[in-house]
Image: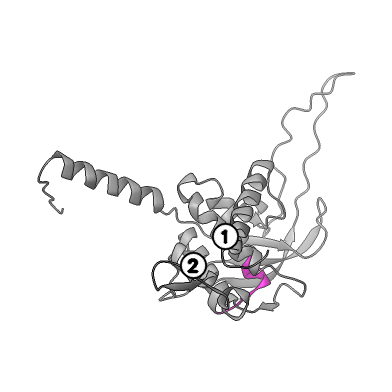
Amino acid sequence: METRTFKDFLDLARFLARREKSMRESPSPTLWRLRLLVPLSILSSGKQFSALELSTERPVDPKELLDQVIWRACFRGIQTLDWFVAFELISKFFMKKMQIDHKLSWYIGVLFESSPRGGTWFSNHPPLRKGRLANRRTAEVGEKRETVLDRITRELSLVKPSKFIEISVNEVTVQYPKADKPRFIGVGYKDKGNIGKPGLKPGEVPLSDYDFVSLQLNEEDELKFSKALQQYFQILQEYGINS
């Protein structure tokens, strides 16, 4: 264990303040295994449906995975599926974390700039370094100048991953379980009680093992998303770019 000494109480106070700030800006990661279903056909109770399964081989740090996708969106290019993975990570893990709100507008900005505009789930979208964000420049401090892409890289501390987390993509057929019918007790009295867990046939994987791709946000998260996007648009104006 490392031993640290302090010259006086003020030195200790400064150390604690720096550590608290670091903990706020870099929350401890919670490992999580990506198992995301993207339905490709209509979901109906008791029926099978086809879906794309996006998964990681092992539990990963959500922020590490998000930064990987964001880096690729900026410098290498992504597929439509990657975009939805980033959206899922932001809405599930980072939308409610107040300690990284100052970065939310930049994450949302990258989502906005790389939004799929047609095509298939496997369509390729060019990196932001080939678009408008890498062309216009504005003065920063002294002689230093930077593009919006430079600013995104700096604000999110983006670096090329030394090893990329692989996201496997498989087309699967999933059984959507049929809920048990409620039992009726007595004459003229319906006791719905507890419907219970839907039954599964041998070999079927329960849907509880998966997350469905998010197609909408709740009201609170939608408001936060909109505010973050407006903040991003305001920053673009500083660089002479209209949203």
Residue toward you, 182 or 64: 64
In the rendered view, would you say 168 is above or below 12?
A: below
- Mark 2–mark 1 CB contact (< 8 Å): yes
Residue 110 drawn in magenta: no
Tag shown at residue 183: none
Q: How is this picture coloured?
A: one colour
In the rendered view, would you say 135 is above or below 61?
A: below
Q: Secondary structure at mark 2?
A: helix
User: Residue 79 occupies which quadrant of the picture?
Assistant: bottom right
Horizontal relation, residue 243 to residue 77: left or right: right
Tag shown at residue 151: 2
Q: Which residue is mark 1?
A: 235
Q: Amino acid at mark 1?
A: Ile
Residue 77 drawn in magenta: yes
- Residue at the outermost front position: 142
The percent coordinates of residue 77 (x first, y second) are 60, 78
| Mark toward the viewer: 2 or 1 | 1
Q: Residue at x 80, y 33 (%)?
A: 182
Magenta stretch, residue numbers:
76-83
